[in-house]
Image: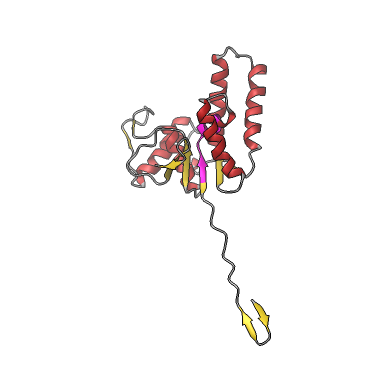
């Protein structure tokens, strides 16, 4: 508000537009690292992450995704004949450090899963999947699980994908950014962003 003589001028300064928040799937970061995907996918991943570094979007990565990345890198190195711990771990550390250096990228730790209701300490992996899929099913999402002991028998969505969706919703994200062709359930609690084609689906 500015005073000019007896007149008071009111200036309205618009608020900056709200940035959309993207939960980033592990395959986006693996492609960004450059050695675990096709060249055109690496370029698409770099373009997408540059928009986060430039402040045009907000990006969130969970420690769940980081665990997936570490597993994929270790397996890829083992296939190349690197089986010695001293050969593998420096490469893993370098890759994770590169992710932490991405400007404006927020790393979120933990999961929203209610671990107090899981008997195993630490919880078994299938129990974490069970929690995620039960949550989606109870929330009226279009997910079917024929046998909870057989993680691959899920209609329309993978078990890891279910955990990522649950985390993305928990952290208030607008999109889940991925190269994955999965997530094909009819009813989803979050919009899927196709990084390769730079469009939502």
Residue 118 % position (x, y)? 47, 37
Does residue 34 appear anywhere in the picture? yes
Residue closest to the far top: 81
Q: Quadrant of residue 141?
A: top left
Is 27 part of what is drawn in magenta? yes
Above-or-below relation of 113 to 8: above
Could you tell me which residue is drawn at 63 percent across and 28 percent down? 95
Between 88 and 193, the residue placed more toward the observer is 193
Residue closest to the far bottom: 6
Tell how many labels.
0
Could you tell me which residue is drawn at 66 percent across and 87 percent down? 6
Q: Quadrant of residue 109?
A: top right
Q: Quadrant of the C terminus?
A: top left
Above-or-below relation of 19 to 48: below
Could you tell me which residue is drawn at 57 percent across and 59 percent down? 16
Between 93 and 134, the residue placed more toward the observer is 93
Between 2 and 131, the residue placed more toward the observer is 2
* Colouring rule applied to residues: secondary structure
Does residue 108 appear anywhere in the picture? no
Between 136 and 66, the residue placed more toward the observer is 66
Residue 165 % position (x, y)? 44, 41
Q: Quadrant of residue 86?
A: top right
Residue 78 % position (x, y)? 56, 16
Is 68 part of what is drawn in magenta? no
Residue 45 % position (x, y)? 54, 35
Q: Quadrant of the N terminus?
A: bottom right
Q: Which residues are magenta?
A: 22-31
**In the displayed structure image, the side of residue 100 where residue 180 appears, left or right:** left
């Amino acid at each position: 508000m500015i005073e000019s003589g007896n007149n008071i001028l009111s200036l309205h300064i618009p608020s900056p537009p709200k940035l959309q928040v993207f939960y980033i799937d592990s395959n986006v970061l693996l492609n960004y690292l450059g050695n675990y995907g096709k060249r055109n996918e690496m370029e698409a991943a770099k373009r997408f992450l540059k928009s986060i570094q430039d402040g045009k979007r907000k990006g969130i990565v969970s420690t769940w995704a980081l665990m997936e990345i570490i597993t994929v890198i270790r397996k890829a190195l083992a296939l190349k004949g690197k089986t010695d711990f001293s050969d593998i771990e420096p490469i893993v550390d370098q890759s994770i450090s590169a992710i932490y250096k991405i400007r404006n990228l927020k790393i979120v730790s933990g999961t929203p899963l209610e671990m107090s209701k899981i008997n195993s300490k630490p919880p078994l992996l299938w129990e974490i999947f069970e929690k995620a899929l039960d949550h989606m099913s109870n929330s009226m999402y279009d997910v079917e699980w024929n046998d909870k002991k057989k993680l691959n028998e899920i209609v329309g969505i993978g078990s890891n994908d279910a955990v990522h969706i649950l985390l993305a919703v928990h952290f208030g994200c607008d999109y889940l950014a991925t190269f994955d062709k999965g997530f094909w359930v009819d009813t989803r609690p979050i919009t899927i962003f196709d990084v390769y084609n730079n469009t939502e689906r």
